[in-house]
Image (cartoon, rainbow, N blue to C red):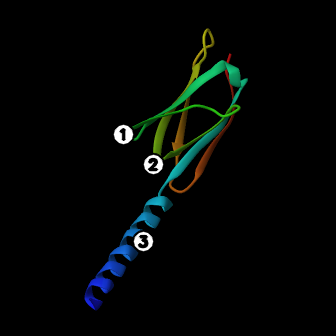
């Protein structure tokens, strides 16, 4: 019984430690779309991933792996798409600032 409990505790510690290292390697990309009603979705494409989100009152945020990303702010209805490029460094947040959709 003692061996089983010790093994269980060791496995739990390993899982927690590995998860902590995974979180440390994450990066993020954020920004603000203005005016908010002109954008429908925001895409982040790169590093083997394609991510999609909607903005909240213009604010958006992606958790990404480190690497280069192409961001597309999809214009609603007759508004033009906006294309941006960002390089997400390990453990850092890239703030794209205010993105104007015309």
Q: Quadrant of the C terminus?
A: top right
At 54% from the left and 57% from the top, the residue drawn is 91
Crowd tier of the residue under label 3, counting other residues whose Cα lies within 10 Å: few below 14, some 14–19, many 20 or above: few
Q: Secondary structure at mark 2?
A: loop
Q: Secondary structure at mark 3?
A: helix
The earlier-in-sequence mark between 1 and 2 is: 1
At 55% from the left and 47% from the top, the residue drawn is 28
Q: Which mark is residue 65?
A: 2
The earlier-in-sequence mark between 1 and 3 is: 3
Q: Position of residue 64 (x, y in %)?
A: 48, 46
Q: Position of residue 15 (x, y in %)?
A: 37, 69
- Marks 1/2: CA–CA distance: 9 Å
Which residue lies under the disc numbered 1? 48
Q: Say which of marks 1 and 3 sits in front.
A: 3
Residue farthest to the right, as pictured: 35
Is residue 45 left or right of 72 when viewed as pictured? left
Residues at circles 1 and 2 in contact by the CB criterion of under 8 Å: yes
Above or below, 15 against 62 in this view is below
């Amino acid at each position: 019984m003692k061996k089983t409990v010790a093994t269980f505790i060791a496995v739990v510690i390993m899982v927690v430690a590995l998860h902590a290292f995974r979180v440390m390697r994450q990066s993020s990309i954020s920004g603000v779309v203005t005016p908010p009603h002109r954008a429908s979705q925001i895409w982040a494409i790169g590093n083997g991933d394609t991510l999609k989100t909607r903005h909240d009152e213009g604010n958006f945020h992606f958790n990404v792996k480190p690497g280069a990303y192409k961001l597309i702010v999809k214009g609603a209805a007759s508004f033009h798409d906006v294309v941006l490029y960002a390089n997400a460094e390990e453990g850092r947040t890239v703030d794209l600032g205010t993105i104007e959709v015309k």
